Image (cartoon, grey):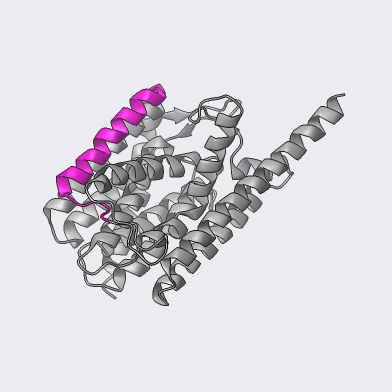
Amino acid sequence: MDYWLPVSVTFLVSFFAIKLVKPIAVKTGLLDYPCDRKVHDGHIPLIGGIAIYFSVLITSMVFIDHSQNLNIYLVAAALVLFLGTLDDRYLLSVKVRLISQIIVASLMIFGTETYLQSFGSILGFFEFKLGYAGAAVSVIAIIAGINAINMMDGIDGLAGALSLIAFGALAFLLSRLTNEWYLLPVLFIAALLAYLLFNLNLHHSFSKVFMGDSGNMFIGLTIVWLMIVGTELDTPAFRPVTALYILAIPLIDMVSVMIRRMKSGGSPFTADRQHLHHLFEAYGYSRRYALVAISLVACVFAFIGCLAEIYFVPEWILFTFFIFLFIGYALCTQHMWNHLNSKKTTELS
């Protein structure tokens, strides 16, 4: 029952923030235009992330106990939201984005003095301690999370749905302990549900909006930050390896796509249409089918992670399974893309 008031307020603030900010986005040119890489009808306002941030900001200040760490998080989130908004409006270079992300992630890590101390027993019967290198590893993890969510935002609802699943798993794991962070993922769930009403056009009166890079970066930052916090509590809410399952699909897809780009001689950060949702489209499936299928698989992995945490499955088993999962995914998707390319070549000849 303690959840109902903050959840309701967050949902309503997010809902009405989208309604209020949308005309401003149109006037200022904060719109997503169709192109070779972005296939949609019309010019879509990129204000989902802004609405989600303000709804979470307002309700977290009211319903979550104030602390220095929370304040630092809210400032860092505002900075990455601002960076994403600039990128949405002016298309910043990869170099500028990465440097800015490093600065924001470093602010979070060194400002709160919270970072990964260990990878746990992922290699067997000893603890893989990180020591002072944990701060750098945590910065890299935050940057990876920011870009993993961003890269999955290719079809309506996908980034929102995958984020919803990740926050759901985090809310469950954090709520098992008494800590100051358990309510934050719940607020994000409420804000995302309001956003998805518009993004998926679930009613004719809800005109479409996109999350934008501002929302993707902000949400990616939050998910990884909560993962770090959850593993570094006095009594950890979960083990580091569990985080891989909570964000499995975005992470696996990002790394495999970047590897394919580098193998073909390109930059790992060059945008293209080789992600998992593009593969579904290439094989003739609808976007809605791809959304449901990918979301269901993500749910399964998050469920496995939570279940493994409850029954304390050995970390090395979880890590080994995840590595095999990644290798299988990379080989399978590479084979499928090769098949499609050879089929096109045959048709052209």
Q: For the point 20% across and 63% down, which residue is it? A: 180
Residue that sits furthest to the front in the current view: 125
**Magenta highlight on residue 111:** yes
Decide whether the magenta segment is chiefly helix, strand or loop.
helix
How many marks on residues?
Answer: 0
Q: Splitting the image into 4 quarters, where does residue 106 fall? A: top left
Q: Quadrant of the N terminus?
A: bottom left
**Above or below, 92 relative to 46:** above
Q: Quadrant of the C terminus?
A: top right
Q: For the point 40% across and 75% down, which residue is it? A: 310
Decide if residue 34 is on the left or right side of residue 19.
right
**Above or below, 127 relative to 195:** below
Residue 312's x, y, as percent? 40, 74
Along the viewing direction, whichever of 73 and 63 lies nearer the viewer: 73
Along the viewing direction, whichever of 100 and 206 lies nearer the viewer: 100
Residue 41 visible in image: no
Along the viewing direction, whichever of 236 and 219 lies nearer the viewer: 236
